[in-house]
Image (cartoon, coloured by chain):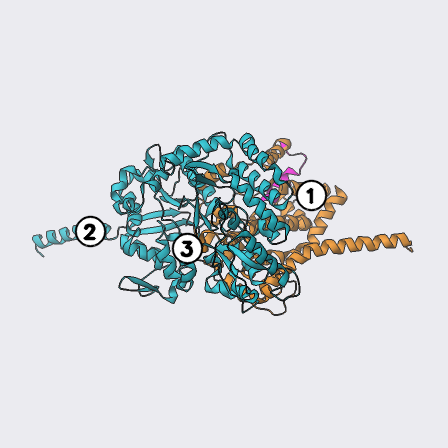
Amino acid sequence: MTKRSIVSLLLALMMLLCITPVLAEEPVTIHVYGLGATIPETDPVLPELGNRLGLKIVVDTAAGGADAATGLMTRMMDNDIPDVFRVGDLNNLAVYHESDAVLDLTPYLDQIPSVVAAFPETDWARLTIDGGIYGIPRRGEVNYMDYFIRKDWMEKLGAKYPTTFDELYDLCVQVRDADLDGNGVNDTYPISGSKLESRAGTLNMFFTAYGVTQPNTLMIKDNQAVWACTDPAYKLALTEIRRFMEAGLIDPEFVSMNEDTLREKMSMGKVFLANGGWCAFAKQAQQDVLKAVDANADWGHIESNIVTELGISGATHTAANFSNVYSFSPDLADDPEKLAAALSIFEYTISGEGDELLCYGLENVHYTKENGVITKLPAMNELGYGWAIQFTGRNDMVYCMTKFAECADEIEHAANEVPILTHYEALVSQPEGVNMADLKAYESEQLIAFIYGTRPMEEYDNFVQELYNLYNLGAYLDAATETLTELGYIK
Amino acid sequence: MVKRHSERIFDVLVILLLVMAGLVCLIPMLHVIAVSLTPYDEYLRRGGMILFPTSITFDAYREFIKEPYLFECFMTTVVSTVLGTAFNILMTVLMAYPLAKTDLLGRKAFNLFVLIPMLITGGLIPTYLVVRSTGMMNTILVYIIPGAIWSYVLIITRAFFTQIDKGIAESARMDGAGEWTILFRLILPISMPIIATIGLMYGVGHWNEYLSGVIYVNRPELRTLQVVLREVLSRNTEAAVDVTVPTKTLQMAGVVFTSVPIIVVYPFLQKYFTQGIMLGAIKG
């Protein structure tokens, strides 16, 4: 072997050695914290997303809600902040900001132009603290809430759908006395639903018909911030509710119920009219439950609205159309490559094939696509955790119609036909000197007392004054007015 | 001795009261087990209040075991309970035995050292810092090491050891036995009641471990069963569109699955448990 060959060989070997580390280089790993659901080992979506973007996504913990917040706070105290973390309660964002535990995204927005374009100014404003942007907004949900009624019982009674509270009252009395489930026991409460403060609350039909939202909410009325239960219309709504309660027409257990227990009561023939989401009652598995006791039970949305001089019955929806957002570790500012990788997850999945991957899975495995229309395949049912990995939310209407085509009528009706009243409290941060948790608890407790008749309605004005005098509601409303003016909701 | 009429009435009343107290404990457990074994449509037809299923199905259990990483989490819980309890007992005995000796130098100071963490705990964040800096994060050790000795269990064990006749150790020592021999060959064999008692306390504590599984562990397979159960029971709000909320039968199957293994241990330890409590009571 000549000297020249040896030198060539050595050079080739050196080049190979130089190249090998590049070939073997590990992809950038992004730790994502607090998705809220356990992602199964067999999940094909996140690995595919990683492949497409040339990075590895590691889910740090599945815990959601308060557990995730506690865990996150603990890690922040130890300066061990996950690369990307989910913030469930936006009030916590200010706390993280004060602790320098969250990255200001303002200098990096040029790396996510599609994300920037996808959200209106008001959404970004919600995540802005002291001029910096500390999270990526999330696409909100459409309305799912509706009023479901036993249509077979309506036919049996030959009744027409009520449009006034008097007509509803007469119908409910008929149902109460008719033993429509034929079990020989007078155990059917005509109206039921979930607890008072829920968007699926039993009494929302009454509140909305009088032009007000459910308890513990903030409304805008006549261009002013109004704490809902202090509006004079509340007294009228509660008086109407009392009339129904006294006649035994409203399920007295509603204060402790949720959609799960409600569905069980509905299937047992104990309910005639219920407030709830189509996602709790209209899906096939839920329809099977609702027909388990009586195969003829026909639950569908009510065909009319109750109208008063002050409003029309419908649903309530929060103006804070997203609650969970993703924020980033401030440490990423020192690692531009990692930051770019983390941001690319959001930029890629905000629309197009990235969005389709997170919402529907893999093409030809979980869905097919023809002329831009996605059709679900049975394997899509295995992606029940999909909601947890939709980093920027989803185009909700298209998503629901694609995934739950069998509920199309109910989805359409809830989203497009049900009148909606908006409430705004989730947009307002609690000012100093006000404890809204205490105020809300007292409000709920007292409203229940009025509804059950243990506190006379004559004392309602005193109750409103108590909210101002004992809980400093005035200071909250001042803050609310300022915030809602800044966000453009109050002109 | 023939009992008087009034005494007999009193006995009957006491028995009735105890039976009622027993039923109050038994009925909820019976209900949970019965619901978990009942077909969901039958559960609905019978109005939800079931104590004895008329037809039995394991569908709810079949559904529950489909939970991601359930087997791994079950094994994590079993291993952490067995190893953790053994380690707890060893550490507790090794500390309680010398503290029971009245001639131990600085005994009062040591006892105070034990008492303080019972009254004032370190808190979540300092504990987290210790766990992380000692490299235990994301290992099964987080279930075993940080709670190696519970102060009040140590105090119970120490109290038990102080009641043992000193003559046993002294005579063994005269025969040439060392401290290790005395502890492991003489003292421990006659201390089985207290070992079983504290073993049960520690064992139940490990089995019910929840917070460590949320705070110190990021890998899904290292979660405890209680964390999995919490996830199943609370799956309702955000997931509402995508997930059909688990039926009551599935929820109850989860409760049975996560609680029965520790409940079946009780009967085997019952006799020691009673004896352990009694010994303390008589000699106290």
Locate the C terminus of chain A by quadrant: top left
Q: Amino acid at mark 1?
A: Phe
| Chain coloured cyan | A
Mark 2 residue type: Ile
Q: Which residues are magenta?
A: B90-106
Q: Chain of mark 1?
A: B
Q: Position of residue A248 (x, y in %)?
A: 63, 53
How far is mark 1 from mark 3, CA to CA? 73 Å
Residue at the spot 65% in from the left edge and 51% down from the top edge: B196
- Residue B39 seen in this snapshot: no
Percent from the top left, x then y, of residue A107? 27, 37
Q: Tell me the subunit letter for badge 2.
A: A
Tell me the tag on residue B54: none
Mark 1 highlights which residue?
B160
Q: Which residue lies under the disc numbered 3? A: A417
Disc ID at residue A19: 2
Asked if residue A339 lies left or right of residue A41, the reply is left
Colour orange maps to chain:
B
- Using the image as rendered, state which of residue A103 and residue B92 is in the foreground: A103
Secondary structure under the numbered disc 1 in the rendered image: helix
Q: Is residue B156 visible in the rendered structure shown here? A: yes
The x and y percentages for residue B268 are 66, 57
Q: CA distance from mark 2 to mark 1?
A: 68 Å
Labels 2, 1: front one: 2
